[in-house]
Amino acid sequence: MKSCLFTTFFISLICFSCGSSSSSNSETGMQNLHAMRHQQMHNELKQKDVQSGLSDVPVTGAADEHEGIFDADDPKTPLFRQKWKEGVVFYAQGKEPGWSLSIYQSGFMRFQTTDGLYFSAHDVTPLPCIDPKIIDYRAVSEKGEMIIQMVEKTCGDKISGDTSDYSLDISLKLKGKNDKTILNGCGDFIPDTQLSGNWVINNIDSLKIDPDSFNIKQPVLSIDLYKQTFSGNDGCNSFHGPVKFKLNKIMFGQAARTLTACPDMEISEKIINSFMGKSMTYKISDGLILYNGDGESMVLKRAE
């Protein structure tokens, strides 16, 4: 694990290899068998996790009306839809042995392996860290303690071809055991499906946006959850850029913009500068409210 200020111990990383090149036919055959078994375990765990009963999980309200937001051609679509319905905000998988981890909006955490190990906790505690690309959690139950470290970097499974936004290192210390179990894998935050779609910008920093002030375009913001992009216009110029999601946060990247000159650019510049390149918390009630720090930065309404 990468070091954070709170850390009082270090976790040794164990690297597993799924085989190496060999000119020997027997070694190649063993490698192929290993790869086939790895893929089989991966598929079994994914299917088991989608269909598993969650009697011990505090389930949130269903979101069937939003389930079409994920790209149907992506292999993660069924899993992401199911996880959002269950209230999962972060989901990860690993190998050697196969395992899955789900963290829920309620704070509940569920971990299980293909060989029968199960660990759950009802109060997952985030741990402070000075590196913004690292997120750490501690989960404690009657079975023991788990430390989870999420590092924001592309993480891929060479055999399955899946890629994720986070690399995970997990340390599990079970009561009555002298040794820790060290695991690694890949994971993603599950986007809040309520964010998907087109939003009309009504307020910027308490400034009311009057649609009649814009002769060409009404300021709007569109969010594509699966492609992880945002787009729209500021009343004058169109824009688009990348967006990432964390727990209750939206992280807008730098946007590319058209360069049309309009009579009054002040409000347009205020709009684009209010969120571009910023990490913002949000709340959804009658509309969408974006916060920059403690202050309300933007108020939007669902486009009709």
Image (cartoon, rainbow, N blue to C red):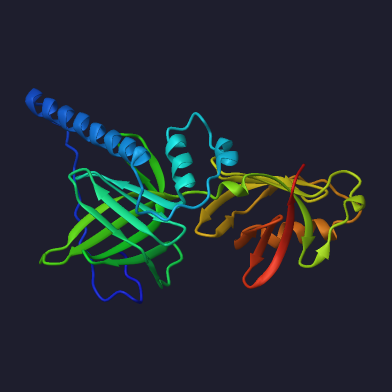
Q: Residue at x 53, y 52 (%)?
A: 244
- Residue 177, percent from left and from top: 11, 64
Q: Quadrant of the C terminus?
A: top right
Q: Is residue 115 or residue 201 the one in the foreground?
A: 115
Residue in view at x 11 percent, y 29 percent: 30
Q: Is residue 287 left or right of residue 164?
A: right
Q: Quarter-wise, where is residue 126 in the image?
A: bottom left
Q: Position of residue 275 (x, y in %)?
A: 67, 59
Q: Across the whole image, how many numbered discs are drawn on residues?
A: 0
Q: Nearer the viewer, residue 232 or 24?
A: 232
- Residue shown at 45% from the left, 41% from the top: 82
189 sits left or right of 225 in the view: left
Is residue 275 placed above or below 195 in the rendered structure? Answer: below
Report x, y in % for residue 263: 92, 53
Residue 68 visible in the displayed image: yes
Left or right, 89 with reference to 35: right
Q: Residue furthest top?
A: 25
* Position in image of residue 171 (x %, y %): 24, 61
Above/below status of 1 relative to 54: below
Residue 239 visible in the snapshot: no
